[in-house]
Image: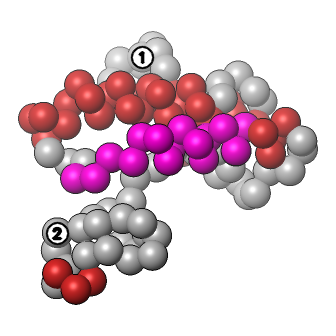
Amino acid sequence: MPPADAPGPIYLSAAALAQRIREKKVSSRDAVIACLARIANVNTQLNAVVQLCAERALMEAKEADGLLAQGRPRGPLHGVTMTIKEGSTTPGSRWALWPAAWRTWS
């Protein structure tokens, strides 16, 4: 459990992060950068992130911030950073648990 005064968006719940993004107290891009830094710090021990899509995440965060600036959020969790479980069909991703013929989906 993080300390109550833990800085940064990585310790916020999805709802709290979404609220701060809506209030423009934190940008989606800043949240992604914080998450990428945390992944870099702990993933060598955890091996939880199999395929890191950092560039894509930053691009999508920039798009989310732009839509918010235009007053066009896409939903209640607009701009919130997340990971996708390995094996989920995400365009352009590869995963290890599926047969070789299915490992690239686009």
Circle 1 packing at 10 Å, graded few (<14), some (14-19), many (20+), is few
Toward the viewer: 23 or 29?
Answer: 29
Q: Closer to the N terminus: mark 2 or mark 1? A: 1
Q: In the picture shown, does residue 56 fall above or below 5? A: below
45 on left or right of 103: left
Q: In the picture shown, does residue 35 fall above or below 15? A: above
Circle 2 packing at 10 Å, graded few (<14), some (14-19), many (20+), is few
Residue linked to disc 1: 6
How many marks the image carries: the answer is: 2
- Residue 12 appears in the picture as rendered: no
| Image quarter (top left, top right, bottom left or bottom right) of the N terminus | top left
Look at 22% across and 53% down and name the residue there. Answer: 50
Locate residue 63, reporting x and y percent: 70, 44
Inspect the magenta stretch and tell me whether residue 58 lies in it. Answer: yes
21 on left or right of 96: right
Look at 76% across and 57% down and name the residue there. Answer: 74
Overall secondary structure of the magenta stretch?
helix
Residue linked to disc 2: 96
Based on the displayed image, in which of its 4 quarters is residue 71 positioned?
top right
Locate residue 4, reporting x and y percent: 42, 19
Look at 20% across and 48% down and name the residue there. Answer: 48
Locate residue 92, reporting x and y percent: 42, 66
Segment tinted magenta in the rendering: 50-65
Look at 24% across and 67% down and name the residue there. Answer: 95
Query: Which element is circle 1 on?
Result: loop
Q: Amino acid at mark 1?
A: Ala
Query: Which element is circle 2 on?
Result: loop
Inspect the magenta stretch and tell me whether residue 29 lies in it. Answer: no
Distance from disc 2 to disc 1, alpha carbons, whole Å, reads 35 Å
Toward the viewer: 84 or 93?
Answer: 93
73 on left or right of 88: right
